[in-house]
Image: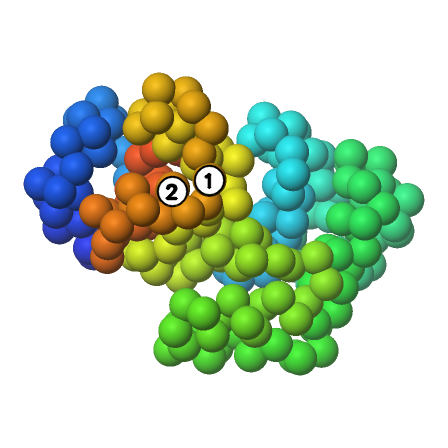
């Protein structure tokens, strides 16, 4: 289901940024799709840390084949060696297991997140081992569908901004934020279309 703000955001972005307008016109029938269950979204984001989208999908497919239904109990019941055999590093195995324990023990307040501000959700999430700001931002985008998230540490976004706005020249986080002022309060939507400018197939978290 399309986020309720999506079409309104596209119209605003097209008015404020001609480059963004052109990118959106090249991808007219796609939109962000909610991913649903929080544990699934966060585990998927951990798998995708610091590797390519293609590699992350391959590891995730093997991980799902090993654990079955992706849930805290199913992850906690798996042997560490089996999870490593899916292509996960030792550290990512630890991170996903720690995430599963937090969910199983109720030490994070999932039901509160929809009512919390973006930075409050990030502060809550980064208390879990292996969840840094990037992973928390992916959660805000793909699970909570927050409309104004700008993940400046995302390598794909950095590359897309460089190619679309700087003729391939390297860009800093400060430079990205400066360009993104024209996208507020719809930076999530702009980010999503910049990802599409690199890969038309939507990334999943």
Residue drawn where x is 35% and y is 26% of the image = 166
Query: Regarding mark 1 in the picture, which secondary structure is present there?
Result: loop
Numbered marks: total: 2
Query: Is the residue marked by circle 1 packed among few (<14), some (14-19), or many (20+) residues within 10 Å?
Result: few
In the picture, measured across the screen, residue 187 lies left or right of residue 74, that is: left
Residue drawn where x is 9% and y is 41% of the image = 15
In the picture, measured across the screen, residue 46 lies left or right of residue 101, that is: left
Query: Is the residue marked by circle 2 packed among few (<14), some (14-19), or many (20+) residues within 10 Å?
Result: some
Q: Quadrant of residue 81?
A: top right
Task: Report the residue marked by disc 1.
Answer: 172
Task: Report the residue marked by disc 2.
Answer: 176
Q: Quadrant of residue 18?
A: top left
Given the current orientation, which residue lies at the most extreme top position? 167
Camera sees residue 3: no
Q: Are marks 1 and 2 in contact (CB under 8 Å)?
A: yes
Residue drawn where x is 41% and y is 20% of the image = 168
- The percent coordinates of residue 44 (x first, y second) are 60, 47
Query: Regarding mark 2 in the picture, which secondary structure is present there?
Result: helix
- The percent coordinates of residue 67 (x first, y second) are 73, 48
Mark drawn on residue 88: none
How has the structure been colored for display? rainbow
Looking at the image, which is closer to me, 82 or 162?
162
Looking at the image, which is closer to me, 124 or 112?
124
In the picture, measured across the screen, residue 122 lies left or right of residue 63, that is: left
Camera sees residue 192: yes
The CA span between labels 1 and 2 is: 6 Å
- The percent coordinates of residue 95 (x first, y second) are 75, 56
In the picture, measured across the screen, residue 157 lies left or right of residue 25, that is: right
Eyeballing the image, is 32 above or below 22?
Answer: below
- The percent coordinates of residue 185 (x first, y second) are 23, 57
Residue drawn where x is 49% and y is 51% of the image = 138
């Amino acid at each position: 289901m399309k986020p309720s703000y999506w079409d309104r955001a596209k119209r605003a972005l097209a008015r404020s940024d001609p480059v963004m307008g052109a990118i959106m016109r090249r991808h007219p029938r796609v939109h962000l799709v909610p991913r649903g269950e929080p544990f699934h979204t966060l585990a998927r984001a951990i798998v995708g840390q610091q590797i390519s989208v293609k590699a992350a999908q391959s590891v995730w497919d093997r991980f799902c084949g090993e654990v079955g239904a992706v849930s805290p109990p199913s992850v906690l019941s798996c042997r560490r060696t089996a999870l490593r055999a899916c292509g996960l590093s030792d550290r990512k195995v630890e991170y996903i297991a720690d995430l599963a324990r937090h969910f199983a023990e109720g030490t994070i307040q999932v039901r509160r997140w929809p009512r919390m501000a973006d930075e409050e959700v990030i502060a809550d999430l980064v208390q879990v081992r292996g969840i840094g700001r990037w992973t928390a931002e992916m959660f805000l985008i793909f699970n909570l569908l927050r409309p104004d998230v700008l993940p400046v540490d995302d390598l794909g976004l950095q590359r897309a901004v460089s190619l679309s706005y700087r003729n391939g020249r390297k860009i800093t986080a400060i430079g990205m934020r400066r360009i993104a002022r024209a996208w507020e309060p719809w930076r999530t939507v702009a980010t999503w279309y910049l990802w599409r400018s690199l890969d038309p197939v939507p990334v999943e978290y």
